[in-house]
Amino acid sequence: MLVADDVRSTALAGDVRPLILHVIHQLRTGGLENGLVNLINCLPESRFRHAVVCIEDFSDFRHRLERGDAPVIALHRSQIGVWRLRKALFSLCRRLRPTIVHSRNQSGLDALLPARLAGVRRCIHGEHGWDVNDLEGRQVKPAMLRRLHSPLVDRYITVSDHLRDYLVERVRIAPQRVVQIVNGVDTARFCPSAEPGRSGLPDGFRGRDALVVCTVGRLQPVKDQETLLRAFALLVAGGRPEARLVVAGDGPMRTALVELAASLGIADRCWFPGTVSNVAGLLRNCDVFVLPSLAEGISNTLLEAMASGLPVLATAVGGNRELITEGENGWLFEPRDVATLVRLLSRYVDEPAMLRDQGRRAREMAVTRFSLPTMVGRYQAVYEELCNRT
C-alpha cells in the first residue's frame, strides 16, 4: 500500500465531520479524475473530510488536491491481486470509518462489499463512461457485476442520460435510485482570452491567420486521436497548409501518434506537448476543439473548451450528444469518420464568422448550464441526504 499523505489526518480525535472515501481506478490526468479533484476542492471544508483510494496507483496529478486533509492511497491491484485488494479495502474502512464510500466505474465495485462488511452504512456508486473494450455497455459480464453489487449501493450517480439509461434499462436499477449530475466547469478559470496573440504556443508554430485545432486527453485507444491526425493530414493536403494541430496529453499511444504524424507528412504542423499543466492557457490560444473519442461519459475537456469560447467537434457518442447542439456550438460526427471531420474543419477555415459565433454560443452554454457551483451543489445535496440517514 502506497500512501501519498498521512492517513491519520482523516481521523483526528474529536473531528465530527463526515468522511467521504472516494474509490477510483487511478488518480492520473483524466476527465473523471479532474472532476473528483474539483469536487473535493470545492465542497465546504467545514462540512466534509475526504480520502481517495486508488485501486491501482496515482501520479503527480494528486498535487492538484488543495485540501490538507485528503490523503491519497494506492493499493496496486495488478500487483497484489483482487483478494488482497479486498482485504486492504476492508482494513482501510475499519481504520478510517468513513461515513460514505463513493466508488466510481467498474473497478470501484471491488470496494463495496469490503466497505459493508467493515460497517460502512452508506455507499454511492458513480458511472462516468466506457472503456474501449465495451464502448456501448453491451457486454454481459460488466452489466452482471453491476447488478450483483446493486444491493450494496444506496444511490447511483451518472454524468449523462446515456449512462442513466444503461443503469435503468440494462442493469435494471430502479430509476429513483439514480441521480444524474452533469460535470461542471470552472468558467472563471476557463474563459476566452482577453488579449490577442498566441503566446502559449511554440515560437513560429502558428502562421498568420492559421486555424489552430486542438485536442486534450489521455493518449489511449478509446480517445482515438488517430482519426483526428488522419483528418488533419487531409485538411492540409486539401489546400490548408497554414493549419496547425495541438495534441495535448500523454499515454500509451503517444509514440505511435507521433510516428503517424511523421508518416502522414504533418509532423512540422503538429505539436505534442505531453501533459499540460495550464490547459486553460492552452485552450485560449486555439481556435477549434476536437474530441474524436469512441466512447464518452460527459467530457470535462469538452466543457473546458466550450467555456474557453471554442466551437467543438465531437463524436456522436455517450454524453457528447447532450453537450453539442449542432450548428449552435459545434457539430457531431460518427466515430472514425475521417471524411466528415475534414469537411467540418474546412468549414471553419472558410467561414470565420461561423467559428466566432459558435464559440460565443459555446461559452454561453457552459456558463448557464454547466457551471462548477451547480455540480458541487448537487453532489453536496446527495452527500447531505445520506449523512442524515446514518
Image (spheres, rainbow, N blue to C red):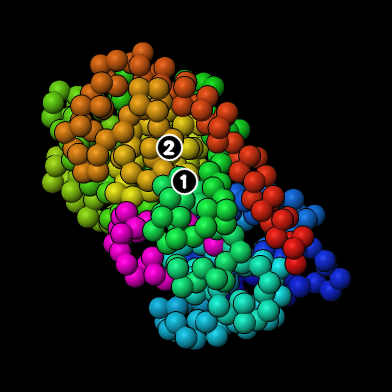
The answer to whether any part of residue 141 appears in the image is: yes
Magenta region includes residue 297: no
Q: Is residue 131 magenta?
A: yes
**Residue under pointer 1:** 160
Task: Please tell me whether residue 357 is drawn above or below residue 140 in the rendered image.
Answer: above
The residue carrying pointer 2 sits among few (fewer than 14), some (14 to 19) or many (20 or more) residues within 10 Å by Cα, namely some
Q: Determine whether 332 is above or below 242 in the image.
A: below
| In the rendered image, the vertical position of residue 96 relative to residue 70, given as above or below | below
Circles 1 and 2: CB distance less than 8 Å?
yes
Spatial separation of the CA atoms under disc 1 and disc 2:
8 Å
Q: Position of residue 181 (x, y in %)?
A: 56, 46
Of the two numbered discs 1 and 2 on the same chain, state the one appearing first in sequence.
Answer: 1
Q: Is residue 326 above or below residue 298?
A: above
| Location of residue 78 in the rendering, given as x and y in whole percent from the top left corner | 40, 78
Q: Which residues are magenta?
A: 125-145
Q: Which mark is residue 139?
A: none
> What residue is rendered at 72% in x and 56% in y?
385
Secondary structure of residue under mark 1: loop
Which residue in the structure is indicated by mark 2?
A: 322
Q: Is residue 199 visible?
A: no
Under circle 2, the secondary element is helix
Quarter of the image for the N terminus: give it: bottom right
The x and y percentages for residue 139 are 30, 64
Report the side of 382 relative to 133 (left or right). right
Residue drawn at x 47%, y 77% is: 76
Task: Give the residue drawn at x 29%, y 49%.
Answer: 294
